[in-house]
Amino acid sequence: MDIRTLGIDLAKNVFQVHGVDGKGRTVVQHQFRRRQLLPFVAQLRPCLVAMEACGSAHYWAREIAQRGHQVRLMSPRFVQPYVKSNKNDARDAEAICEAVGRPSMRFVAVKSQVQQDMLALHRVRSLLVRERTALMNQMRGLLAEYGIVITQGAVPLRRALVQILEPQNHGVSELLRELLGEMSERLHFIEDRLKGYDLRIAEFARADERAGRLMAVEGVGPLTATALIAAVGNARQFRSGRELSAWLGLVPRQHSSGGRGVLLGISKRGDRYLRTLLIHGARATLRFAARKRDPRSRWISAMRERRGTNIAAVALANKNARVLWALLAHNQDYRALAAA
């Protein structure tokens, strides 16, 4: 078969393929089981293989690329307009095959196994953070039903639990004390696991020269540096820092028409986890900017005075994202401006 472009609609067990020749004529349109896909791709001559950037897409992209093909991943949002009539697997594969040939199409870089390992570490850590927050909130809610209100924060809760779990404390029943004891043990386990994950992430950051360069930027620590490297690699799939900021959802949404430009709030597209890390890092930087006199700190202070803390934090996160793109894409060291 003379297949020049092959579109694959991915799933868990059933895969639909749609292949066209050099003139765009359909050559193959077939459904394969999971075990059949790679043998079919391996017997083809090298061609362009397109898939949506969805679950397991990076694994399949690596496997297919090892068999001599050029692989392109696309956001499902950009493929959807090419779906004709009703949606089904065959139409999806055809739309993927057609969308990959558009000159203006944007592609997703294929992640290596090392990048996916680091992303998995961040995802598991993020899940534990949410579980810890939920567990603490449940403990507070149970205690509030008994008239015990604890000051906001993790440290006050830990201190209060030490007193509440003492046998001499008659403010709570024996059953509630037993339940709180079990929840406290679970909380200690989660916090121990989080410390272990943080140490492992810090080790990765120390071992990776790129992470060291990123952490030179104020407001960027091991979490942000390793998460960004795992998500974008060398960031060269973005033509500019603004493209990276747009991918992170840190630039304004547009609703312009008739020559009249209308800018709204930030788009909040892309990687929510990375965007959150950058904004939290920017908030930490804002706390100390007023004490410094370098150009960057003066800009932060002026922005905060003019627009408020929240907008200033997002603006700084946007600026940091562009700086981080330059450090990764051009393999440069961060050069901070000295105080005037």
Image (tube, rainbow, N blue to C red):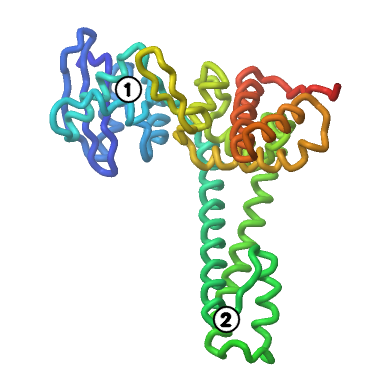
The image quadrant of residue 178 is bottom right
Across and down, in percent, residue 249 comes to 49, 32
Compared across the picture, whether 228 is left or right of 288 comes to: left
In this view, 96 is above or below 259: below
Answer yes or no: do the residues labelled 1 and 2 have beta carbons within 8 Å? no
Residue shown at the point (33%, 18%) measured from the top left: 48
* Amino acid, disc 2: Gly
Dot placed on the residue nearer the N-terminal end, 1 or 2: 1
In percent of width and height, residue 242 lies at: 54, 21
Mark 2 neighbour density, 10 Å: few (under 14) some (14–19) many (20 or more)? few
**Which residue in the protein does label 2 denote?**
147
- Quarter holding the C terminus is top right
Q: Nearer the viewer, residue 31 or 88?
A: 88
Q: Say what secondary structure mark 2 lies in.
A: loop
Looking at the picture, how far across and down is residue 292, in whole percent?
82, 33
| Quadrant including the N terminus | top left
Residue 297 location, quadrant: top right
From the viewer's side, name the closer residue of 326 and 148: 148
For the point 22% across and 30% down, the residue is: 92
Residue assigned mark 1? 49
Question: Quick one: SS at disc 1?
Answer: strand
Q: From mark 1 to mark 2, how far is it between C-alphas?
A: 63 Å
What residue is rendered at 58% in x and 34% in y? 228
**Furthest residue toward top:** 23
Answer with left or right where residue 317 lies relative to residue 284: left
Amino acid type of disc 1?
Answer: Val
The one nearer the camera, 38 or 334, is: 334
Q: Residue furthest left?
A: 85
- Residue 230 lies, in percent from the top left, at 55, 35
Asked if one can make out residue 75 in the rendered structure from this viewpoint, the answer is yes
Residue 259's place in the image compared with 13, above or below, is: above
